Amino acid sequence: MIFFIENLVVIVKNRTFVFVITKVRCSMYTTKMKERVVGVDIGLELTTYAIVDLRGNIVARDHFPTEDYATISSYVSKLAESIMFLAETNGGYETIRSVGISCPSANFKTGCIENAPNMPWKGVIPLAALLRDRLGLAVAVGNDCHIMALGEHAFGCAHGMKDFVLLGIGHGLGSCVFTRNKAHLGANGFAGEIGHTCVVDNGRQCTCGLKGCLESYVSTRGIVMTAKEVLAESDKPSLMRDVEKLSPKIITEFCDQGDELAIEVYRRTGYMLGISMATVASQFDPEAIILAGGIHHAGKWLIDPAQASFDQHVFHNIRGKVKLLITTLDDRERDLLGASALAWEVEEYSLFK
């Protein structure tokens, strides 16, 4: 049922506007609530998108290569066309309420991707506005760790927690702090950029332009750089010496085979990660710190030294009280569900209002 206001009188009383409704018309016309949203996960290599219903069920999904679209204009066109086709072939476009997007360096407050060092498009890109104008739907964007945290909070090991920290370790390193059931985004929307805190004065060159950032040590690229340093410092035999292009996955496999230098790579990485986690825990006193992203698959080789370093450096009053957890969700599915959770938060939009 909808009420239409026909007569409205505005009175100014004590410098306050008072609205007096003198006539109301009632209509039995009803609108059906749209019960689906679209979640989008923009990765360096692949863009995955899905229709998700109110219960968090993924109705349909598809993907396309991110790197095939060098300009943001061509990328937005492809994304809009893909979303519309998926919607029309799975229940109809009219069932979609809004769109939520996960992307590195995306700012929820501005709706923009802002100077993403690892993405193909540079500068400030108003992605939410560009896609909204193509689709005629509300669009919200969030950085990948913000979205990971939403996914973990709704469907993962942070479910039921009010205060936790998520660390996303992959091509980059970021975090999201949840306090009182809400993501802390900061005054400008950039809270959680732990990867770009300086941990080594005048250290390695980071993709952001600074030197000594944590991300240049604890990330895919950082781990490979540590491996090269370890090999250069030692004459010991190592399986890593015979590999032209190292990766964290290969280094993990060599750890499983007992390679001492490969184990040393993760020992150094874990030590630095543990110090940073201890700093975050001492600042925010969370129930748990959750590790997510591709690098967490290194398992005990990374987690054990990180836990030891964390216990060594965390503030003594919370030592033993902050849990260190590893995500149990599939990375891609969690990020799609997290993006869909963000879509429900944005106010509904229509070109026809």
Image (cartoon, rainbow, N blue to C red):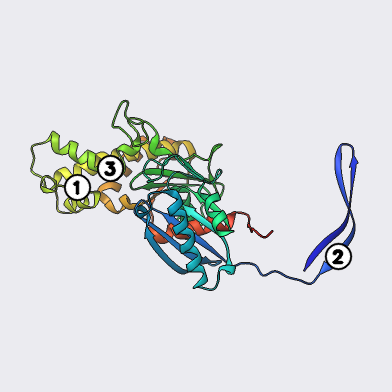
Q: Disc 3 or disc 2, which is closer to the eye?
A: 2
**Viewer-side residue, 49 vs 182:** 49
**Viewer-side residue, 310 vs 292:** 292
Q: Secondary structure at mark 3?
A: helix
What amino acid does circle 1 point to?
Answer: Leu
Residue 299 seen in the current view: no
Q: Could you say which disc has been placed on residue 221 in the image?
A: 3
Q: CA distance from mark 1 to mark 2?
A: 71 Å
Dividing the picture into quadrants, the one containing residue 31 is bottom right
Q: Of label 1 and label 2, which has the lower sequence position?
A: 2
Residue at the image point whose x is 56% and y is 54% from the top: 132
Residue 45 seen in the current view: yes
The reply to whether callout 3 and callout 2 are in contact (CB within 8 Å) is no
Q: Secondary structure at mark 2?
A: strand
Q: CA distance from mark 3 to mark 2?
A: 64 Å
Q: Which residue is mark 2?
A: 25
Q: CA distance from mark 3 to mark 1?
A: 10 Å
Residue at the image point whose x is 42% and y is 46% from the top: 104
Q: Secondary structure at mark 1?
A: loop
Q: Of label 3 and label 2, which has the lower sequence position?
A: 2
Total numbered labels:
3
Left or right of 188 on screen, residue 244: left
Q: Which image quadrant: the C terminus? A: bottom right
Residue at the image point whose x is 19% and y is 54% from the top: 253
